[in-house]
Image (tube, rainbow, N blue to C red):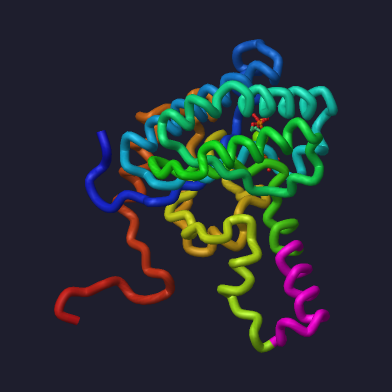
């Protein structure tokens, strides 16, 4: 059941809490990541049913490389398996996939899998699913600035021509509307370097639910909360007969 009131068109999710979920069950952290990938499938399906048009999910941050190498290796294997096994089903469900983040750190098999998944699903329009892998907000903005500086040095751009729209066009999220709602599971109330530019006016929703437990009912709670928010974007509330 969807909530009355405005529906967010674009939802960003920090899928946090896999490790603690596993620990609570006396299982290795890898089991938490596996359960987390099932939660993502559930959530994509639930979001599609509710008419959400875009989901952007944080799967692996540029700082997650600092974790023990066995965990990083497991996460990369899980990602490659998902690329090989789950893309056909997403395609069947009219989901268009896009990966955001710095791809250069991944091995050729993963890079190729990402390219193929994007190509296969590029004409779908049921739900746009952006998966942030090796993503960092600081890195994204730094890379955009580097590109702009290059164009200025080459003489194809004057500093006065640098606008917010021009910078936005250099971000990984080029062409996407900003998220209306950010959901972070796992109880932490921070952004952890996610979409720093794009979240400027996004409504933030934090829940203690651990990501592997997240389902359609939890999504509905977040949607109901969002429906009660008043977004002002620095202006004043809309008043009748003002
Ligand atoms: C989120 O869950 C998944 C990734 C960061 C890859 P965590 O692995 O951070 O789980 P917790 O926060 O340790 O419980
Ligand atoms: C954020 O979670 C990154 C992802 C969910 C992929 P982390 O677990 O890495 O964040 P911190 O370390 O608690 O800030
Ligand atoms: Mg975490």
In which quadrant of this rendering is ligand 1 seen? top right
Camera-side residue of 186 and 94: 94
Q: Main secondary structure of the magenta part?
A: helix
The residue located at (47%, 32%) in the rendering is 91
Q: Going by the image, does 118 lie left or right of 148?
A: left
The residue located at (54%, 58%) in the rendering is 199
Q: Going by the image, does 13 lie left or right of 132?
A: left
Q: Position of residue 190 (x, y in %)?
A: 61, 48
Quadrant position of the N terminus in the picture? top left
Q: Position of residue 223 (x, y in %)?
A: 35, 43
Q: Going by the image, does 160 lie left or right of 226?
A: right
Residue most extreme to the left: 241
The residue located at (24%, 51%) in the rendering is 5
Q: Is residue 138 above or below residue 191?
A: below
Read off the magenta span. 143-159
Q: Is residue 147 magenta?
A: yes
The quarter of the picture where residue 172 lies is bottom right
Residue most extreme to the right: 69
Q: Is residue 121 magenta?
A: no
Q: Position of residue 187 (x, y in %)?
A: 55, 37
Q: Is residue 214 above or below residue 123?
A: above
The quarter of the picture where residue 44 lies is top left
Camera-side residue of 5 and 157: 157
Whether residue 206 is visible here, answered yes or no, is: no
Whether residue 11 is visible here, answered yes or no, is: yes
Residue most extreme to the top: 26
Q: Position of residue 158 (x, y in %)?
A: 71, 87
The residue located at (61%, 50%) in the rendering is 191
Quadrant position of the C terminus in the picture? bottom left
Number of numbered discs on residues: 0
């Amino acid at each position: 059941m969807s909530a009355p009131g405005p529906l967010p068109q674009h939802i960003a999710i920090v899928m946090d809490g896999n490790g603690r979920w596993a620990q609570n069950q006396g299982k290795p952290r890898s089991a938490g990541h596996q359960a987390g990938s099932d939660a993502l499938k559930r959530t994509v399906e639930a979001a599609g049913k509710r008419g959400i048009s875009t989901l952007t999910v944080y799967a692996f941050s540029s700082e997650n490389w600092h974790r023990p190498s066995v965990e990083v290796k497991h996460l990369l294997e899980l990602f490659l398996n998902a690329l090989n096994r789950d893309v056909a089903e997403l395609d069947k469900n009219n989901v268009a996939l896009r990966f955001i983040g710095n791809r250069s750190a991944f091995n050729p098999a993963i890079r190729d899998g990402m390219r193929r998944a994007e190509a296969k699903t590029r004409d779908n329009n049921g739900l746009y699913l952006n998966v942030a892998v090796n993503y960092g907000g600081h890195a994204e903005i730094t890379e955009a600035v580097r590109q702009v500086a290059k164009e200025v040095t080459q003489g194809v751009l004057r500093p006065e021509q640098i606008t917010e729209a021009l910078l936005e066009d250099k971000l990984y999220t080029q062409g996407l509307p900003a998220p209306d709602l950010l959901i972070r599971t796992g109880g932490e109330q921070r952004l952890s370097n996610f979409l720093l530019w794009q979240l400027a006016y996004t409504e933030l929703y934090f829940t203690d639910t651990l990501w592997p437990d997240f389902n359609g009912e939890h999504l509905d709670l977040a949607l109901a909360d969002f429906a009660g928010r008043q977004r002002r974007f620095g202006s004043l509330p809309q008043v009748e007969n003002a």
